[in-house]
Image (cartoon, rainbow, N blue to C red):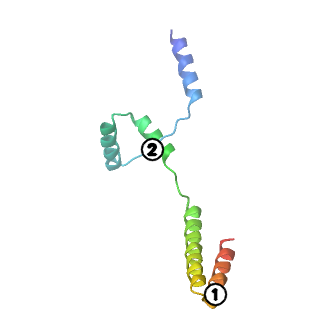
Amino acid sequence: MSNISENRKQKYDNKFVRKTIRFTSDEFSVIQKNLEKGDITFTEFARSSILKKKLKLPIEKELIYQLNKIGINLNQIAKSINKNEKISVLQQLVKIEKMIKEIK
């Protein structure tokens, strides 16, 4: 009988990867409250939280910031073109070109 339960445990352990995570007591209190509200297990809560959360890596944040700056410049160019301010448009295009070179 013990041999059968050993085989089941071994199959189970081979199927999954186990990771350890540490929390402060305050952090875990918050987690406990969420578990009670949701009436779910810690494993379900952790799996759902980790898999559904999209992380922004530091490089992504910087690229988004730079692209946003370029977008702002493009909007300024569009406004200038609509007002027939061609010199201002050329200055903005030069700024965008410099920013794109910095990103590369």
Give the amino acid at mark 2.
Ser
In this rendered view, identify the residue nearer to me: 7 or 89.
Answer: 89
x and y percentages locating residue 47 in the rendered image = 47, 39
Task: Name the residue located 55 percent from the left edge and 75 percent from the top edge.
Answer: 72
x and y percentages locating residue 57 in the rendered image = 56, 58
In this rendered view, identify the residue nearer to me: 71 or 26.
Answer: 71
Task: Name the residue located 65 percent from the left edge and 72 percent from the top edge.
Answer: 103
Crowding near the residue tagged with mark 2, few <14, some 14–19, many ≥20 C-alpha atoms within 10 Å? few
x and y percentages locating residue 42 in the rendered image = 40, 36
Task: Name the residue located 53 percent from the left edge and 21 percent from the top edge.
Answer: 9
Q: Which residue is mark 1?
A: 91
User: Which of the labelled discs sits on residue 15, or is there none?
Assistant: none
Which quadrant of the view contains residue 76? Answer: bottom right
Crowding near the residue tagged with mark 1, few <14, some 14–19, many ≥20 C-alpha atoms within 10 Å? few
Task: Name the residue located 51 percent from the left edge and 43 percent from the top edge.
Answer: 51
Q: How many marks are shown on the rendered structure? A: 2
SS at badge 1: helix
In this rendered view, identify the residue nearer to me: 97 or 79.
Answer: 79
Q: Is residue 27 above or below residue 17?
A: below
x and y percentages locating residue 38 in the rendered image = 34, 37
Cα distance in 3D space between marks 1 and 2:
47 Å
Q: Which residue is mark 2?
A: 49
SS at badge 2: helix
Which is nearer the N-term, disc 1 or disc 2?
2
Give the amino acid at mark 1.
Gln
- Between label 1 and label 2, give the one nearer the viewer: 1
Q: Is residue 103 above or below residue 49?
A: below
